[in-house]
Amino acid sequence: MKKYFIFIFCFSFLVEAIGQITPRNILAKKYSLAEVKQVLKDQDQYRPYPTTPDVWRAAVPDSMLRNIIQTAEKYLNSEFPSVTATVSLDFVRSGDRERHRGVAYPKRDALFALTLAESIENKGRFTEAILNGVWSICEESYWGVPAHIRGTGLPDVEHPVVDLVSAETAALMGLVDYFVGDKLDEINPLIRKRIYHETNQRIFIPMLNYTDEYSWMSKTRPVNNWNPWIISNWISMTLTLEKNQTRRAEMIHEAMLGLDLYLNGLGEDGGCDEGPGYWFAAGGSVYDCLELLGSATNGKVQIYDHPLVQKMGAYIYKVHIDGDYFVNFADADPTRVPEGLFLYRFGKALSDDKMIAMGKWAFGKYPNEELDLAGHRRPRRLENMLTLNKIGEPIDSYGKVPDAWFEDIEVMTARDNTGLFLATHGGHNAESHNHNDVGDFLLYSNGEPIIIDAGRGNYTARTFSPQRYELWFTQSNYHNLPIINGRGQSPGRSYGATDAKSIINDQSAQLSMNIAAAYPTETGLINWKRSVALNRNSHKVEINDAYTLKAKPESLQQAFITIADVDLGTAGEIRITTPKSQKFVIRYDARKWSAASDFPSNEGMEYSSFKTKWDGRRVQRILLTNKELKQKDNYNFLIEKR
């Protein structure tokens, strides 16, 4: 059969591969196909969500039910516009992804709200709009997004591609069938038949026959959030749509084997190299899968007691800084509202008191954020609604961990008792959603950014192409790193830290590493030993660098990235003042360095999100330029309150 090589690009691109696989096969070793067949509920027995007004009222607060109905009423006259060929071709013509998103995503959000409202109200008010939404989506040639089929722009309907959004759409169709299928039959029995046919052609058949074509189902290298995210939707749609019990069990078991591939790619510490924002779609989606599997088997399928799953869950509170700030190396955004209802359930499943507490705190602080009907992961949204009456009273705070070390991804976090929070990492430059940032660090004080990782810009065609590292936010030159002979780090698995070692105790937390291998040979580097440490007694952060070059360098610089106000008027001091008037200083040797600053661009498709990402504050790069230019030297920078 002809192979269609799909460029699925939530991995590091155009870099040699990629990491270690540990064939744990947790689910495969614990559950055979025969065992799954034995415990899996038939379709007509699978009733995880309310389907009548009385059951809805008993399970979900009236305020939430009213919100759903009011939201759906706004969509009663929706026209469900078609996705034109011109809109589909935007990505290959201009790199733009937004116009397609603006047509396709609202249709799905509307259909979900209308479906829930009809199930809750049961008056037939929303059925005609649901009919039009279902039919409009079924008429689309492709349920995914054009960016995920890359080269063609238009889909090959004879060979459907399973991507995140096509899987999300199919799971939505399954929920429509679950909640209002009988009412659709009253209009015309061909509607539900069409739902199953389209899902079967677009998802079930490819997932049973063509998964070797998808990098997110690779058996030879680690896979990222696409795997558990898509598989959670595959499980959901199988449970709601597939009537044939033999095929139903086969797909569920295949989904379990697929989920093993993600777990096999994790290190022993359960770290997520994509960062916390993606964890909610990666490790978080693993929980979505397990929650669905447990519901469909009366709890007979579960692996919550496995140490890897427990560590994978604990990752999220170990990289939480404060409020909605999380450690944001690589493509992770600096802020991500923690999903309290979700974290509460995950914590209960793991018997993890810290995660339970984080969930109760997050729900109290952000009570409405995860109850919005718009967006992906709709089975999770349903479970969140059903958790509202179970979570109990929120709490004002939870005990944040004092430090953490993820040896598998070489990330260290630490805080002191004055509100300082440091994160730093080694790793390599072929991580998922990679930035060239080996040796980078960030610093917060009382939940406010002092030294930052700028994060990612907008996703466009260039973000996932050979031109990725032309974008400033992916370059080490715009991270808190040295620039050697005018060169930054290079992308690729061979470009990474060596000898990474973390030392953590009550007095300090330090990560030391050699970052020389992260730079191209043209820099002439032999060694660059860096240590980044938080002194918990003096409440200071110290960066120590010791390097050896093959020859005297032509230039040597050190960058610091911030959104705070910067005063360079005093030699030897970079004075930083935050929006909340916290005052810090970066001390440097003025005999060795001169200081300047600049502002990277926030104009253009890839950069426009930087206009709002940091509460509207410009990302600023402080650039120290070395005056002595020695072949071998060492120096340090000290960051403290003033």
Image (tube, grey):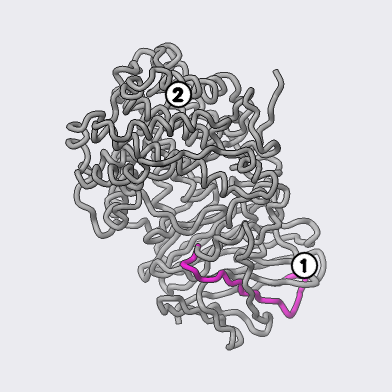
Query: In the figure, is residue 355 to the left or right of 456?
Result: left
**Mark 1, residue position:** 485
* Closer to us: 509 or 45: 45
Residue 161 horizontal/vertical position (percent) = 60, 29
Q: Give the magenta range.
A: 613-632
Magenta part, dominant SS: loop
Residue 544 horizontal/vertical position (percent) = 60, 69
Could you tell me which secondary element the residue under label 1 belongs to?
A: loop
Quarter of the image that includes the N terminus:
top right
**Mark 2, residue position:** 195
Query: In the figure, is residue 54 to the left or right of 384?
Result: left
Could you tell me which secondary element the residue under label 2 belongs to?
A: helix
**Picture layout, residue 64 above or below residue 242:** below
Task: Work out how far the residue at label 1 is from the one at label 2, CA to CA, in angstroms.
Answer: 60 Å
Q: Is residue 614 magenta?
A: yes
**Can see residue 289?**
yes
* Closer to us: 26 or 371: 371
Identify the residue at horizontal 77%, vertical 67% (top origin). Answer: 485
Q: Which quadrant would residue 439 be assigned to in this image?
A: bottom right
* Closer to us: 422 or 176: 176
**Picture layout, residue 220 above or below residue 625:** above
